[in-house]
Image: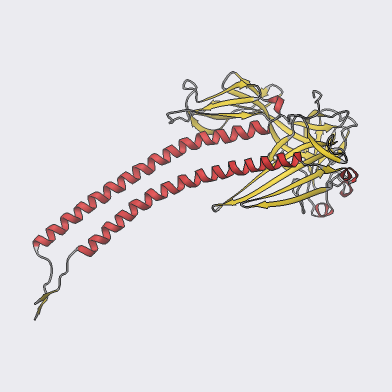
Amino acid sequence: MTIRRMGAVLAELVVALMIAGAAAVIGISLLVTAERRTRADATADRTTQAARDVARILTAEIEAALPESVAVRGDTALDLQSHLAASVACVASGSVIVLPGAATSAGLPFTYVRQLPEAGDLLLAWDSTNAGYWFAAGVDSVSPQPYGGGCATTSGYRTLADSLAPIATTRLRLNRTLPATVSAGAPVRLYRGARWFLHRGSDKTWALGYRRCANASCSSAQPVAGPLASFADTGLSFAVLSPGVITISVKPVSAAVRSKFSVAIRSAPDGPPNAPP
Amino acid sequence: MQRAHSGFALPLAIVVLVAFSLAIALIVDGAVSTFRAASADFELARAGAAAESALAEALDSRLDTAVLHLASGTVLSRRASAAPDSVETTVQLLVPPMVRILVVLHSRHAGLRVSAGRLATGRLSPDQVSAGDLRIIPTRSAWWVPIP
């Protein structure tokens, strides 16, 4: 005979409730610990990320900058000519230079643009006179040229497909006349004056700040990466501890320790002598 | 006499297992996010270093003097692969004797895809050691830039 018992006795119920309670307490405490740990990890990540961002931005800026323009101002600001574009002159005549398009329908382009050039930027064009030097001029105006602006398909720097597409070239008017020895095919670089510094925002937080500079005057500041420790706590500092090497110290706002890293200015070791621009 | 027992053991075990799984999932998720960020940074740095090496190699290589007779705008390109990297090295002939060297490296490792590029400007000069060859001498200033 089988006796089917319906429900549980009180003792069973009490034991089950106690076990469930204990399991719930353990589970909840585990969840709380995990959540706290995740939150702490996220804060640490953000702190590390702020230091990482500053390191990545400044390393990229210094390495690609015009080497002789990199200068430490005081110990909380760094001035440099920031790299905008690398190209080739398709047309070089008078005070006008035309650069091929940054895109091409086949192969690799002759122009690489990091930021679009604007009036006030610095242009360097290679002058092959003697051992060669970089001829420097300011950019007065920039205009896209959908139909080539004189950059012919026979030049070798604009394909027929690019012309038919049409892929625009860029025409730059300079504040100086190009020497006759700067001709089509001359390597061209474009730079923009910049200042990187420890910036205090209107919300009283500190960050890596950027100012665009031209002709000894700088525009308003923009915060770029942070938050960093305050000026009093040396959130960001620059130093030249050995020639050609910039050492940067950065301390995110909630970090216990500061990060230090060094960036070498990339001057070619054995290039031809360079006449001053 | 048999008794069919209907207690709380199974639902309780399920609840406990779910709670534990959730806690472990949270911890593992945090660890994986941190690991991924670190891996991406590491892979980018490694790709950058590999592109630097490839550029140094390209600058050390020699070109035949015949390239001086090629038209401006001519592009010479070669590709090399060694897992996990593939490197494309391109020489663009500009106004003689100027050239540009572009190195573009693509890497795929541990599910991460990264790319790094370097561009250098130089001039061709007769090689003093090997007659009939040309070497590339980088311009002293503004000779190097990373490219997207």
Q: Residue at x 71, y 25 (%)?
A: A68
In percent of width and height, residue A31 lies at 31, 48
**Residue A145, quarter of picture:** top right
Q: Is residue B13 above or below residue A27?
A: below
Q: Nearer the viewer, residue A123 or A234?
A: A234
**Residue A72, quarter of picture:** top right
| Residue at the far top in the pictured view | A74
Q: As drawn, is B10 to the left or to the right of B38?
A: left
In which quadrant will I find the C terminus of chain A?
A: top right
In percent of width and height, residue A67 lies at 70, 28
In percent of width and height, residue A79 lies at 65, 25
Is residue A185 in view?
no
Q: As drawn, is A207 to the left or to the right of B16?
A: right
Tell me how the rendering is colored.
secondary structure
Is residue A226 in view?
yes
In which quadrant will I find the N terminus of chain A?
A: bottom left
Q: Is residue B144 above or below residue B77?
A: above
Q: Residue at x 79, y 54 (%)?
A: A165
Q: Nearer the viewer, residue A201 or B116?
A: B116
| Residue at the far bottom in the pictured view | A1
How many marks do you count on the picture? 0
In percent of width and height, residue A253 lies at 45, 30
